[in-house]
Image: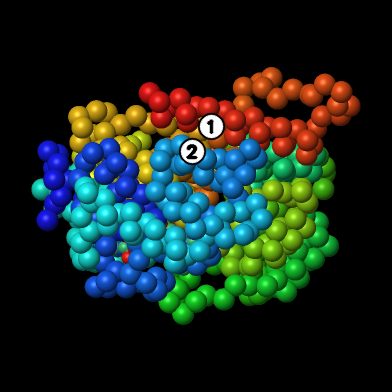
Amino acid sequence: MTKTSSHTPIHVIGGGLAGSEAAWQIAESGIPVILHEMRGVRGTDAHKTDGLAELVCSNSFRSDDATSNAVGVLHAEMRLAGSLIMRSADANQVPAGGALAVDRDGFSNAVTAALESHPLITITREEVTGLPPEEWDQAIIATGPLTAPSLAEAIQARTGADSLAFFDAIAPIVHTASIDMDICWYQSRYDKVGPGGTGKDYINCPLDEAQYNAFIDALIAGDTTGFKEWEGTPYFDGCLPIEVMAERGRETLRHGPMKPMGLTNAHNPTVKPYAVVQLRQDNALGTLYNMVGFQTKLKYGAQAEIFRLIPGLENAEFARLGGLHRNTYINSPTLLDRSLTLKGRPGLRFAGQITGCEGYVESASIGLLAGRFAAAERQGHAPALPPETTAFGALLNHITGGHIVSDDEPGKRSFQPMNINFGLFPPLEPGTVTKPEGMKRFRGKDKAIAKKHATAARALDDCARWLKD
Ligand SMILES: Cc1cc2nc3c(=O)[nH]c(=O)nc-3n(C[C@H](O)[C@H](O)[C@H](O)COP(=O)(O)OP(=O)(O)OC[C@H]3O[C@@H](n4cnc5c(N)ncnc54)[C@H](O)[C@@H]3O)c2cc1C
Protein backbone atom coordinates (compact mmCIF):
# COMPACT_ATOMS: atom_id res chain seq x y z
CA MET A 1 0.00 0.00 0.00
CA THR A 2 1.27 3.42 -0.93
CA LYS A 3 1.54 5.78 2.02
CA THR A 4 -0.46 9.04 2.02
CA SER A 5 0.38 12.04 -0.19
CA SER A 6 -1.46 13.91 -2.92
CA HIS A 7 1.25 12.92 -5.42
CA THR A 8 1.42 9.71 -7.45
CA PRO A 9 4.39 7.63 -6.25
CA ILE A 10 7.73 7.38 -8.01
CA HIS A 11 9.05 3.83 -8.40
CA VAL A 12 12.67 3.04 -7.58
CA ILE A 13 13.99 -0.37 -8.66
CA GLY A 14 16.92 -1.62 -6.58
CA GLY A 15 17.59 -0.84 -2.93
CA GLY A 16 21.38 -0.62 -3.11
CA LEU A 17 23.52 2.46 -2.59
CA ALA A 18 21.90 4.45 -5.42
CA GLY A 19 18.29 3.29 -5.05
CA SER A 20 18.26 3.86 -1.28
CA GLU A 21 19.58 7.40 -1.68
CA ALA A 22 17.20 8.15 -4.56
CA ALA A 23 14.21 6.92 -2.53
CA TRP A 24 15.27 9.05 0.43
CA GLN A 25 15.69 12.23 -1.62
CA ILE A 26 12.30 11.77 -3.29
CA ALA A 27 10.50 11.10 -0.02
CA GLU A 28 12.19 14.02 1.71
CA SER A 29 10.80 16.30 -0.97
CA GLY A 30 7.27 15.17 -0.09
CA ILE A 31 6.67 12.64 -2.87
CA PRO A 32 5.78 9.02 -2.10
CA VAL A 33 8.11 6.26 -3.25
CA ILE A 34 7.71 2.57 -3.92
CA LEU A 35 11.11 0.92 -3.59
CA HIS A 36 11.36 -2.51 -5.25
CA GLU A 37 14.23 -4.66 -3.96
CA MET A 38 14.60 -8.29 -4.99
CA ARG A 39 16.83 -9.46 -2.15
CA GLY A 40 14.58 -11.33 0.20
CA VAL A 41 13.16 -13.27 -2.76
CA ARG A 42 16.24 -13.48 -4.98
CA GLY A 43 19.88 -12.88 -4.13
CA THR A 44 22.89 -11.78 -6.18
CA ASP A 45 26.32 -13.39 -6.52
CA ALA A 46 27.91 -10.82 -4.22
CA HIS A 47 25.34 -9.63 -1.65
CA LYS A 48 25.12 -11.65 1.55
CA THR A 49 22.16 -10.07 3.38
CA ASP A 50 18.71 -8.66 2.69
CA GLY A 51 19.70 -5.26 4.10
CA LEU A 52 19.35 -2.18 1.93
CA ALA A 53 22.55 -0.44 0.79
CA GLU A 54 24.68 -3.49 1.57
CA LEU A 55 28.39 -2.94 0.91
CA VAL A 56 29.43 -5.96 -1.13
CA CYS A 57 33.16 -5.74 -0.60
CA SER A 58 35.30 -3.12 1.12
CA ASN A 59 33.80 -1.15 4.02
CA SER A 60 35.52 2.07 2.95
CA PHE A 61 34.01 5.19 1.40
CA ARG A 62 37.62 6.25 0.69
CA SER A 63 39.14 9.63 1.59
CA ASP A 64 37.07 12.05 3.63
CA ASP A 65 39.39 14.95 2.82
CA ALA A 66 37.21 17.60 1.21
CA THR A 67 40.11 19.95 0.51
CA SER A 68 42.40 17.87 -1.67
CA ASN A 69 40.65 14.63 -2.60
CA ALA A 70 37.86 14.44 -5.18
CA VAL A 71 35.87 11.74 -3.39
CA GLY A 72 36.17 13.76 -0.17
CA VAL A 73 34.61 16.69 -2.04
CA LEU A 74 31.79 14.39 -3.16
CA HIS A 75 31.22 13.34 0.48
CA ALA A 76 30.96 17.00 1.48
CA GLU A 77 28.52 17.82 -1.33
CA MET A 78 26.35 14.84 -0.42
CA ARG A 79 26.25 15.96 3.21
CA LEU A 80 25.17 19.43 2.05
CA ALA A 81 22.38 17.79 0.05
CA GLY A 82 21.04 15.85 3.06
CA SER A 83 22.27 12.44 1.94
CA LEU A 84 20.96 9.44 3.88
CA ILE A 85 23.96 7.36 2.79
CA MET A 86 26.41 9.90 4.25
CA ARG A 87 24.35 10.39 7.42
CA SER A 88 24.31 6.62 8.00
CA ALA A 89 28.02 6.32 7.19
CA ASP A 90 28.95 9.14 9.58
CA ALA A 91 26.89 7.50 12.33
CA ASN A 92 28.65 4.16 11.84
CA GLN A 93 32.27 5.15 11.34
CA VAL A 94 35.14 2.92 12.29
CA PRO A 95 38.72 4.22 12.61
CA ALA A 96 40.48 4.35 9.23
CA GLY A 97 42.91 7.26 9.22
CA GLY A 98 41.86 9.87 6.68
CA ALA A 99 39.32 7.54 5.10
CA LEU A 100 35.67 7.19 5.96
CA ALA A 101 35.16 3.52 6.78
CA VAL A 102 32.02 2.09 8.30
CA ASP A 103 30.70 -0.82 10.27
CA ARG A 104 28.98 -2.46 7.30
CA ASP A 105 26.07 -4.00 9.21
CA GLY A 106 25.48 -0.90 11.32
CA PHE A 107 25.53 1.20 8.15
CA SER A 108 23.11 -1.01 6.19
CA ASN A 109 20.81 -1.34 9.23
CA ALA A 110 20.70 2.45 9.62
CA VAL A 111 19.77 2.95 5.95
CA THR A 112 17.16 0.18 6.10
CA ALA A 113 15.59 1.53 9.30
CA ALA A 114 15.43 5.11 7.96
CA LEU A 115 13.75 4.00 4.74
CA GLU A 116 11.36 1.57 6.45
CA SER A 117 10.21 4.17 8.91
CA HIS A 118 9.79 7.02 6.44
CA PRO A 119 6.07 7.82 6.13
CA LEU A 120 6.30 8.25 2.35
CA ILE A 121 8.31 5.12 1.51
CA THR A 122 6.88 1.68 0.77
CA ILE A 123 9.35 -1.17 0.29
CA THR A 124 8.33 -4.19 -1.75
CA ARG A 125 10.53 -7.26 -1.87
CA GLU A 126 10.19 -8.43 -5.46
CA GLU A 127 12.24 -8.87 -8.60
CA VAL A 128 11.26 -6.51 -11.39
CA THR A 129 11.63 -8.67 -14.47
CA GLY A 130 11.13 -6.15 -17.26
CA LEU A 131 11.21 -2.44 -17.99
CA PRO A 132 8.84 -0.50 -15.74
CA PRO A 133 5.28 -0.57 -17.14
CA GLU A 134 4.04 2.68 -18.76
CA GLU A 135 1.74 3.35 -15.80
CA TRP A 136 4.86 3.86 -13.65
CA ASP A 137 5.23 7.26 -15.26
CA GLN A 138 8.22 8.18 -13.09
CA ALA A 139 10.70 5.41 -12.33
CA ILE A 140 14.39 4.99 -11.59
CA ILE A 141 16.34 1.83 -12.44
CA ALA A 142 19.15 1.47 -9.90
CA THR A 143 19.83 -2.24 -10.08
CA GLY A 144 23.59 -2.02 -10.06
CA PRO A 145 26.47 -4.02 -11.52
CA LEU A 146 24.66 -7.30 -10.78
CA THR A 147 21.28 -6.43 -12.32
CA ALA A 148 19.13 -9.56 -12.49
CA PRO A 149 19.29 -11.18 -15.96
CA SER A 150 15.69 -10.72 -17.11
CA LEU A 151 15.73 -6.97 -16.44
CA ALA A 152 19.17 -6.70 -18.07
CA GLU A 153 17.77 -8.45 -21.16
CA ALA A 154 14.79 -6.09 -21.24
CA ILE A 155 17.12 -3.07 -21.04
CA GLN A 156 19.23 -4.50 -23.82
CA ALA A 157 16.18 -5.21 -25.99
CA ARG A 158 15.04 -1.60 -25.58
CA THR A 159 18.41 0.12 -25.99
CA GLY A 160 20.14 -2.12 -28.55
CA ALA A 161 22.62 -4.97 -28.36
CA ASP A 162 25.67 -2.69 -28.24
CA SER A 163 24.38 -0.50 -25.47
CA LEU A 164 24.76 -2.78 -22.48
CA ALA A 165 28.10 -4.13 -21.30
CA PHE A 166 28.37 -7.09 -18.96
CA PHE A 167 31.90 -6.57 -17.79
CA ASP A 168 34.56 -3.93 -17.75
CA ALA A 169 37.74 -4.42 -19.73
CA ILE A 170 39.39 -1.31 -18.50
CA ALA A 171 42.60 0.28 -19.70
CA PRO A 172 44.37 2.57 -17.22
CA ILE A 173 43.67 6.31 -17.43
CA VAL A 174 46.43 8.82 -16.75
CA HIS A 175 46.29 12.48 -15.69
CA THR A 176 47.64 14.35 -18.73
CA ALA A 177 49.66 16.75 -16.59
CA SER A 178 51.71 13.85 -15.22
CA ILE A 179 52.97 12.71 -18.66
CA ASP A 180 56.51 13.82 -19.52
CA MET A 181 56.16 15.63 -22.85
CA ASP A 182 59.95 16.03 -23.10
CA ILE A 183 59.93 12.31 -23.90
CA CYS A 184 56.46 11.82 -25.44
CA TRP A 185 54.93 13.59 -28.43
CA TYR A 186 51.52 14.20 -29.98
CA GLN A 187 50.83 12.37 -33.25
CA SER A 188 48.11 10.20 -34.78
CA ARG A 189 49.34 7.10 -36.58
CA TYR A 190 50.30 8.11 -40.16
CA ASP A 191 49.22 11.64 -39.16
CA LYS A 192 45.67 10.58 -39.96
CA VAL A 193 43.34 13.48 -39.41
CA GLY A 194 39.94 11.71 -39.51
CA PRO A 195 36.63 13.36 -38.63
CA GLY A 196 37.10 15.69 -35.68
CA GLY A 197 40.84 14.86 -35.48
CA THR A 198 43.92 17.00 -35.98
CA GLY A 199 46.53 14.39 -36.90
CA LYS A 200 47.97 14.88 -33.42
CA ASP A 201 45.32 13.20 -31.33
CA TYR A 202 47.46 10.67 -29.47
CA ILE A 203 50.27 10.97 -26.97
CA ASN A 204 53.06 8.54 -27.89
CA CYS A 205 55.66 7.01 -25.58
CA PRO A 206 58.73 5.55 -27.37
CA LEU A 207 60.55 2.38 -26.26
CA ASP A 208 63.88 1.11 -27.56
CA GLU A 209 64.57 -2.63 -27.78
CA ALA A 210 66.04 -2.95 -24.29
CA GLN A 211 63.20 -0.95 -22.74
CA TYR A 212 60.64 -3.05 -24.61
CA ASN A 213 62.18 -6.31 -23.43
CA ALA A 214 62.38 -5.11 -19.83
CA PHE A 215 58.74 -4.07 -20.03
CA ILE A 216 57.64 -7.48 -21.42
CA ASP A 217 59.60 -9.28 -18.69
CA ALA A 218 57.91 -7.16 -16.02
CA LEU A 219 54.47 -7.79 -17.52
CA ILE A 220 54.94 -11.56 -17.60
CA ALA A 221 56.26 -11.60 -14.03
CA GLY A 222 53.54 -9.22 -12.81
CA ASP A 223 51.08 -10.23 -10.12
CA THR A 224 47.58 -10.77 -11.58
CA THR A 225 44.28 -10.79 -9.78
CA GLY A 226 42.39 -14.06 -10.09
CA PHE A 227 38.95 -14.03 -11.67
CA LYS A 228 36.39 -15.07 -9.07
CA GLU A 229 34.31 -18.12 -9.96
CA TRP A 230 31.16 -16.12 -10.47
CA GLU A 231 32.97 -13.77 -12.79
CA GLY A 232 33.58 -16.59 -15.27
CA THR A 233 33.24 -14.28 -18.23
CA PRO A 234 35.28 -15.34 -21.25
CA TYR A 235 37.68 -12.90 -22.92
CA PHE A 236 36.35 -11.59 -26.17
CA ASP A 237 38.22 -10.67 -29.33
CA GLY A 238 40.14 -7.45 -29.17
CA CYS A 239 39.97 -7.28 -25.40
CA LEU A 240 42.70 -9.62 -24.23
CA PRO A 241 44.57 -8.43 -21.16
CA ILE A 242 48.02 -7.18 -22.18
CA GLU A 243 49.83 -9.61 -19.89
CA VAL A 244 47.99 -12.48 -21.63
CA MET A 245 49.11 -11.09 -24.99
CA ALA A 246 52.68 -10.81 -23.69
CA GLU A 247 52.61 -14.43 -22.55
CA ARG A 248 51.60 -15.52 -26.07
CA GLY A 249 54.92 -14.33 -27.46
CA ARG A 250 57.53 -11.67 -26.86
CA GLU A 251 56.67 -9.89 -30.12
CA THR A 252 52.87 -10.04 -29.80
CA LEU A 253 52.47 -6.59 -28.26
CA ARG A 254 54.91 -5.03 -30.73
CA HIS A 255 52.61 -6.21 -33.51
CA GLY A 256 49.49 -5.25 -31.56
CA PRO A 257 48.77 -2.26 -29.33
CA MET A 258 52.48 -1.30 -29.10
CA LYS A 259 53.24 -1.28 -32.83
CA PRO A 260 55.51 1.62 -33.84
CA MET A 261 54.31 1.94 -37.44
CA GLY A 262 53.33 5.35 -38.81
CA LEU A 263 54.88 7.21 -35.89
CA THR A 264 57.99 9.42 -35.81
CA ASN A 265 59.51 10.48 -32.52
CA ALA A 266 59.33 14.28 -32.61
CA HIS A 267 62.25 14.49 -30.14
CA ASN A 268 64.45 12.09 -32.11
CA PRO A 269 63.10 11.86 -35.70
CA THR A 270 65.98 9.84 -37.15
CA VAL A 271 65.66 6.94 -34.72
CA LYS A 272 62.65 4.66 -35.21
CA PRO A 273 61.14 3.57 -31.89
CA TYR A 274 61.18 -0.20 -31.39
CA ALA A 275 57.71 -0.04 -29.84
CA VAL A 276 55.27 2.72 -28.88
CA VAL A 277 52.60 3.01 -26.20
CA GLN A 278 49.77 5.28 -27.34
CA LEU A 279 47.44 7.25 -25.10
CA ARG A 280 44.17 8.67 -26.37
CA GLN A 281 42.24 11.64 -25.03
CA ASP A 282 39.61 10.34 -22.66
CA ASN A 283 37.53 13.35 -21.71
CA ALA A 284 36.38 16.49 -23.47
CA LEU A 285 38.50 18.62 -21.12
CA GLY A 286 41.69 16.85 -22.28
CA THR A 287 42.81 16.36 -18.69
CA LEU A 288 42.79 12.56 -18.94
CA TYR A 289 44.29 10.12 -21.46
CA ASN A 290 43.75 6.36 -21.61
CA MET A 291 46.40 3.79 -22.51
CA VAL A 292 45.17 2.33 -25.78
CA GLY A 293 44.71 -1.46 -25.71
CA PHE A 294 46.10 -1.77 -22.18
CA GLN A 295 43.21 -3.58 -20.47
CA THR A 296 44.72 -5.75 -17.76
CA LYS A 297 44.12 -8.05 -14.83
CA LEU A 298 47.39 -7.09 -13.12
CA LYS A 299 47.04 -6.12 -9.47
CA TYR A 300 46.87 -2.36 -8.89
CA GLY A 301 50.27 -2.12 -7.20
CA ALA A 302 51.91 -4.10 -9.99
CA GLN A 303 50.23 -1.96 -12.66
CA ALA A 304 51.49 1.33 -11.29
CA GLU A 305 55.01 -0.09 -10.93
CA ILE A 306 55.13 -1.70 -14.40
CA PHE A 307 53.48 1.13 -16.35
CA ARG A 308 55.90 3.64 -14.83
CA LEU A 309 58.67 1.70 -16.64
CA ILE A 310 57.31 3.18 -19.88
CA PRO A 311 59.40 6.18 -20.98
CA GLY A 312 57.40 9.35 -20.34
CA LEU A 313 55.18 7.71 -17.74
CA GLU A 314 57.83 7.51 -14.99
CA ASN A 315 55.78 9.91 -12.85
CA ALA A 316 52.35 9.01 -14.21
CA GLU A 317 49.42 9.61 -11.91
CA PHE A 318 46.57 7.26 -12.63
CA ALA A 319 42.97 8.48 -12.55
CA ARG A 320 42.05 4.81 -12.65
CA LEU A 321 43.96 1.60 -13.08
CA GLY A 322 42.98 -1.19 -15.43
CA GLY A 323 40.68 -4.07 -14.60
CA LEU A 324 38.47 -6.79 -15.90
CA HIS A 325 35.39 -7.69 -13.87
CA ARG A 326 31.69 -8.38 -14.01
CA ASN A 327 29.71 -5.18 -14.33
CA THR A 328 26.42 -4.42 -16.02
CA TYR A 329 26.30 -0.85 -17.31
CA ILE A 330 24.68 1.04 -20.12
CA ASN A 331 26.26 3.34 -22.68
CA SER A 332 24.99 6.40 -20.84
CA PRO A 333 26.57 9.13 -23.01
CA THR A 334 24.40 8.09 -25.93
CA LEU A 335 21.35 6.74 -24.09
CA LEU A 336 20.68 9.27 -21.33
CA ASP A 337 19.95 12.96 -21.37
CA ARG A 338 21.61 15.33 -18.91
CA SER A 339 19.03 14.58 -16.23
CA LEU A 340 19.68 10.81 -16.47
CA THR A 341 16.43 10.13 -18.40
CA LEU A 342 16.42 7.43 -21.08
CA LYS A 343 16.03 9.25 -24.39
CA GLY A 344 12.64 8.44 -25.93
CA ARG A 345 11.13 7.30 -22.63
CA PRO A 346 10.25 10.37 -20.55
CA GLY A 347 10.10 9.70 -16.83
CA LEU A 348 12.42 6.66 -16.89
CA ARG A 349 15.79 7.35 -15.30
CA PHE A 350 18.87 5.29 -14.50
CA ALA A 351 21.04 5.72 -11.41
CA GLY A 352 24.05 4.18 -9.72
CA GLN A 353 26.71 1.95 -11.12
CA ILE A 354 24.52 0.86 -14.06
CA THR A 355 25.00 4.37 -15.48
CA GLY A 356 28.78 3.89 -15.66
CA CYS A 357 29.93 5.55 -12.49
CA GLU A 358 32.07 3.41 -10.21
CA GLY A 359 32.13 2.97 -6.45
CA TYR A 360 29.80 3.19 -3.46
CA VAL A 361 29.95 6.97 -3.06
CA GLU A 362 29.67 7.76 -6.75
CA SER A 363 26.72 5.37 -7.14
CA ALA A 364 24.94 6.91 -4.16
CA SER A 365 25.56 10.41 -5.49
CA ILE A 366 24.06 9.61 -8.87
CA GLY A 367 21.10 8.11 -6.98
CA LEU A 368 20.84 11.37 -5.08
CA LEU A 369 20.73 13.37 -8.31
CA ALA A 370 18.27 11.01 -10.04
CA GLY A 371 15.98 11.19 -7.01
CA ARG A 372 16.06 14.99 -6.96
CA PHE A 373 15.50 15.23 -10.71
CA ALA A 374 12.52 12.84 -10.59
CA ALA A 375 11.00 14.65 -7.61
CA ALA A 376 11.34 18.02 -9.35
CA GLU A 377 9.56 16.67 -12.42
CA ARG A 378 6.80 15.20 -10.32
CA GLN A 379 6.33 18.65 -8.80
CA GLY A 380 6.11 20.18 -12.27
CA HIS A 381 9.60 21.76 -12.42
CA ALA A 382 12.46 21.15 -14.82
CA PRO A 383 15.32 19.38 -12.98
CA ALA A 384 18.03 21.84 -11.91
CA LEU A 385 21.39 20.39 -12.97
CA PRO A 386 24.40 20.85 -10.68
CA PRO A 387 27.15 23.12 -12.05
CA GLU A 388 29.95 21.20 -13.82
CA THR A 389 32.42 22.71 -11.36
CA THR A 390 30.92 20.63 -8.53
CA ALA A 391 31.78 16.98 -7.91
CA PHE A 392 28.13 16.15 -8.61
CA GLY A 393 28.29 18.02 -11.91
CA ALA A 394 31.68 16.63 -12.93
CA LEU A 395 30.49 13.06 -12.41
CA LEU A 396 27.16 13.69 -14.14
CA ASN A 397 29.03 15.25 -17.03
CA HIS A 398 31.30 12.19 -17.34
CA ILE A 399 28.27 9.91 -17.55
CA THR A 400 26.04 11.98 -19.80
CA GLY A 401 28.36 13.94 -22.03
CA GLY A 402 31.99 14.47 -21.10
CA HIS A 403 33.25 11.25 -22.60
CA ILE A 404 34.75 11.28 -26.08
CA VAL A 405 33.82 8.47 -28.48
CA SER A 406 36.81 7.86 -30.71
CA ASP A 407 36.45 7.34 -34.44
CA ASP A 408 38.72 4.33 -34.65
CA GLU A 409 37.05 2.49 -31.81
CA PRO A 410 33.38 3.43 -31.96
CA GLY A 411 30.71 1.87 -29.80
CA LYS A 412 30.04 1.04 -26.22
CA ARG A 413 33.43 -0.13 -25.08
CA SER A 414 35.07 3.24 -25.30
CA PHE A 415 32.87 4.45 -22.39
CA GLN A 416 34.21 2.94 -19.21
CA PRO A 417 33.06 3.32 -15.62
CA MET A 418 35.13 5.68 -13.52
CA ASN A 419 35.51 6.93 -9.97
CA ILE A 420 35.30 10.65 -9.32
CA ASN A 421 38.69 12.35 -9.74
CA PHE A 422 39.97 15.87 -10.28
CA GLY A 423 40.55 15.13 -13.97
CA LEU A 424 36.77 15.23 -14.45
CA PHE A 425 36.52 18.83 -13.17
CA PRO A 426 36.86 21.77 -15.57
CA PRO A 427 40.28 23.45 -15.28
CA LEU A 428 40.55 26.50 -13.02
CA GLU A 429 40.39 29.97 -14.53
CA PRO A 430 43.93 31.16 -15.32
CA GLY A 431 45.39 33.10 -12.40
CA THR A 432 43.25 31.33 -9.76
CA VAL A 433 46.31 29.71 -8.23
CA THR A 434 49.15 32.11 -7.59
CA LYS A 435 52.50 31.78 -5.83
CA PRO A 436 52.06 32.30 -2.08
CA GLU A 437 53.99 35.24 -0.71
CA GLY A 438 57.42 34.33 0.57
CA MET A 439 57.56 31.02 -1.34
CA LYS A 440 60.64 30.85 -3.58
CA ARG A 441 59.61 28.21 -6.10
CA PHE A 442 56.00 27.39 -6.78
CA ARG A 443 55.66 24.34 -8.99
CA GLY A 444 55.49 20.57 -8.88
CA LYS A 445 53.82 19.14 -5.81
CA ASP A 446 53.07 22.49 -4.11
CA LYS A 447 51.31 23.80 -7.18
CA ALA A 448 49.36 20.55 -7.69
CA ILE A 449 48.13 20.69 -4.08
CA ALA A 450 47.16 24.36 -4.41
CA LYS A 451 45.19 23.51 -7.56
CA LYS A 452 43.34 20.71 -5.77
CA HIS A 453 42.48 23.05 -2.89
CA ALA A 454 41.16 25.68 -5.28
CA THR A 455 39.15 23.14 -7.31
CA ALA A 456 37.65 21.69 -4.12
CA ALA A 457 36.78 25.12 -2.69
CA ARG A 458 35.17 26.17 -5.97
CA ALA A 459 33.14 22.93 -6.02
CA LEU A 460 31.81 23.36 -2.50
CA ASP A 461 30.88 27.04 -3.01
CA ASP A 462 29.10 26.27 -6.26
CA CYS A 463 27.34 23.28 -4.74
CA ALA A 464 26.05 25.32 -1.80
CA ARG A 465 24.77 27.96 -4.24
CA TRP A 466 23.10 25.32 -6.43
CA LEU A 467 21.33 23.74 -3.46
CA LYS A 468 20.09 27.15 -2.25
CA ASP A 469 18.55 28.14 -5.63
C1 LIG B 1 31.95 -7.97 -6.33
C2 LIG B 1 31.92 -6.47 -6.27
C3 LIG B 1 32.79 -5.82 -5.40
C4 LIG B 1 32.77 -4.43 -5.29
N1 LIG B 1 33.61 -3.81 -4.41
C5 LIG B 1 33.53 -2.47 -4.25
C6 LIG B 1 34.33 -1.81 -3.27
O1 LIG B 1 35.08 -2.43 -2.56
N2 LIG B 1 34.23 -0.47 -3.15
C7 LIG B 1 33.38 0.27 -3.93
O2 LIG B 1 33.31 1.49 -3.76
N3 LIG B 1 32.60 -0.34 -4.87
C8 LIG B 1 32.66 -1.68 -5.04
N4 LIG B 1 31.90 -2.31 -5.99
C9 LIG B 1 31.06 -1.55 -6.80
C10 LIG B 1 29.74 -1.47 -6.02
O3 LIG B 1 28.88 -2.50 -6.27
C11 LIG B 1 28.98 -0.34 -6.42
O4 LIG B 1 29.84 0.73 -6.31
C12 LIG B 1 27.74 -0.05 -5.63
O5 LIG B 1 27.27 -1.06 -4.77
C13 LIG B 1 26.76 0.19 -6.69
O6 LIG B 1 25.64 0.73 -6.13
P1 LIG B 1 24.28 0.50 -6.89
O7 LIG B 1 23.21 1.04 -6.04
O8 LIG B 1 24.39 0.99 -8.28
O9 LIG B 1 24.17 -1.10 -6.98
P2 LIG B 1 23.97 -2.11 -5.76
O10 LIG B 1 24.47 -1.55 -4.51
O11 LIG B 1 24.48 -3.42 -6.24
O12 LIG B 1 22.38 -2.18 -5.64
C14 LIG B 1 21.57 -2.71 -6.65
C15 LIG B 1 20.38 -3.38 -5.99
O13 LIG B 1 19.44 -3.76 -7.00
C16 LIG B 1 18.92 -5.03 -6.67
N5 LIG B 1 18.41 -5.61 -7.92
C17 LIG B 1 19.12 -6.05 -8.99
N6 LIG B 1 18.28 -6.44 -9.97
C18 LIG B 1 17.01 -6.24 -9.53
C19 LIG B 1 15.73 -6.45 -10.08
N7 LIG B 1 15.57 -6.92 -11.31
N8 LIG B 1 14.62 -6.15 -9.33
C20 LIG B 1 14.76 -5.64 -8.08
N9 LIG B 1 15.96 -5.43 -7.49
C21 LIG B 1 17.08 -5.71 -8.22
C22 LIG B 1 20.09 -5.75 -6.04
O14 LIG B 1 19.64 -6.79 -5.21
C23 LIG B 1 20.76 -4.64 -5.24
O15 LIG B 1 20.28 -4.54 -3.94
C24 LIG B 1 31.89 -3.68 -6.12
C25 LIG B 1 31.03 -4.35 -6.99
C26 LIG B 1 31.04 -5.72 -7.07
C27 LIG B 1 30.09 -6.39 -8.01
Rendered-image quadrant of the C terminus = top left
The numbered mark at residue 77 is 2
- Residue name at image x 73 percent, y 74 percent: 221
**Residue 408: x percent and y percent?**
50, 47
Q: Which of 64 and 451 is in front in this view?
A: 64
Q: Which amino acid does label 2 sit on?
A: Glu
Q: Are marks 1 and 2 in contact (CB under 8 Å)?
A: yes
Q: Nearer the viewer, residue 82 or 170?
A: 82
**Residue 189: x percent and y percent?**
62, 45
- Which residue is under mark 1? 460
**Residue 31: x percent and y percent?**
21, 41
The image quarter containing residue 254 is bottom right
Choose the circle earlier in sequence order: 1 or 2.
Answer: 2
Q: Is mark 2 within 8 Å of ligand 1?
A: no
In the rendered view, would you say 15 is above or below 441? below
In the figure, is residue 390 to the left or right of 274?
left
In the figure, is residue 347 to the left or right of 162?
left
Q: What residue type is labelled 1?
A: Leu
